[in-house]
Image (spheres, rainbow, N blue to C red):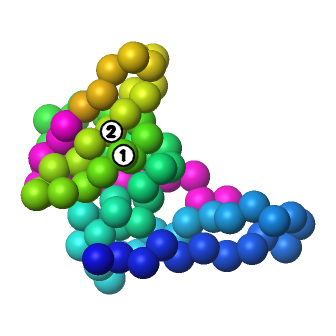
């Protein structure tokens, strides 16, 4: 299981997350739990939401962008890219 990597920004106490290319996609997503991410899928679809859970090769996103009352379950092996605000 990935460990959430945080650091203190020089200008203030905000935490930020670092992506890690040395660990699997699922472990990067686990480290993003509770944060808003954008994932690009093999189909070309782009989904933005808050990471609720990553388990059994599935990503559970909640509070989807422009669909606030919807959640989504996405197979991790269909994700080709993760975008997250890190600073």
Numbered tag placed on residue 35 in the rendering: none
Helix, strand or loop status at disc 1: strand
- For label 1, the residue is 52
Helix, strand or loop status at disc 2: strand
Residue span colored magenta: 73-87
Above or below 19: residue 67: above
Q: Is residue 14 visible?
A: yes
In what quadrant of the picture does the C terminus appear? bottom right
Distance of label 2 from label 1 (alpha carbons)? 6 Å
N-terminal of the pair, mark 2 or mark 1, is: 1
The image position of residue 60, as x and y in percent, is: 26, 42
Specify the principal SS of the magenta part.
strand
Q: Is residue 18 left or right of residue 13?
A: left
The residue carrying pointer 2 sits among few (fewer than 14), some (14 to 19) or many (20 or more) residues within 10 Å by Cα, namely many
Q: Is residue 40 visible?
A: no
> Is there a contact, CB below 8 Å, between mark 2 and mark 1?
yes
Above or below 4: residue 85: above
The image position of residue 63, as x and y in percent, is: 43, 28
State the residue at coordinates (44%, 19%): 68
Q: Is residue 46 left or right of residue 15?
A: left
Residue 28's image quarter?
Answer: bottom left
- For label 2, the residue is 61
State the residue at coordinates (44%, 46%): 37
Q: Is residue 7 left or right of residue 42?
A: right
């Amino acid at each position: 299981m990935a460990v959430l990597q945080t650091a203190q920004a020089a200008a203030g106490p905000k935490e930020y997350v670092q992506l890690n290319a040395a660990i699997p996609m699922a472990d990067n997503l686990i480290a993003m739990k509770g944060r808003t991410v954008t994932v690009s899928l093999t189909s070309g679809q782009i989904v933005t939401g808050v990471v609720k859970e990553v388990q059994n090769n599935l990503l559970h996103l909640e509070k989807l962008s422009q669909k606030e009352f919807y959640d989504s379950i996405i197979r991790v092996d269909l994700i080709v890219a993760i975008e997250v605000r890190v600073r």
